[in-house]
Amino acid sequence: MKNIIAVIAILFSISAMAQDVKPTFEKQGNLIKGTFYFEDGTLRQQGFYNKEGVLHGEWKSYDATGKKIAMGQYKNGVKTGKWFFWSGNKLSEVNYDKNQIADVTTWTDKNNVVVNYKN
């Protein structure tokens, strides 16, 4: 019984020390800028909402080391235009039309096209 109480006490103290980093929201003109964080407080994602609370405008995502892994635009909750995704030594450009993937082009770090998909 003492062991169970000790384990519960240790788990409680560990969870109390872990910070729950809450997102921040700030008004910028007619939009609301949302910033989301990893548990350690580093930036995870940042973008905008319109006054109805729908994704609108530029959004960026980062990995836990702070490296950008995605960037694109929303228009009233719909992915639109060119989105960029970084993964290792590859960059993928994804073109969206009405929230559907229209085509994808992927380059290596030597600017070689490795994939070209058209819908």
Image: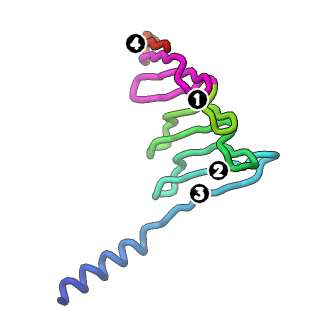
Q: CA distance from mark 4 to mark 3?
A: 37 Å
Q: Give the structural element (helix, strand or loop) at label 2.
A: strand
Q: Earlier in the sequence, mark 2 or mark 1?
A: 2
Q: Is residue 28 above or below residue 76?
A: below
Q: Give the residue drawn at x 64%, y 50%.
A: 34
Q: Earlier in the sequence, mark 4 or mark 3?
A: 3
Q: Which residue is mark 4?
A: 114
Q: Main secondary structure of the magenta part?
A: strand
Q: Which residue is mark 2?
A: 34
Which residue type carries mark 4?
Val
The span picked out in magenta is 81-108
Q: Nearer the viewer, mark 4 or mark 1?
A: 1
Q: CA distance from mark 4 to mark 1?
A: 24 Å
Neighbour class for label 1 at 10 Å: few (<14), some, many (≥20)? Answer: some
Q: Which residue is mark 3?
A: 23
**Residue 71, quarter of picture:** top right
Q: CA distance from mark 2 to mark 1?
A: 21 Å
Q: Nearer the viewer, mark 3 or mark 1?
A: 1
Relative image position of residue 73 (x, y in whole percent): 64, 32
Q: Earlier in the sequence, mark 3 or mark 1?
A: 3
Relative image position of residue 47 (x, y in whole percent): 64, 43
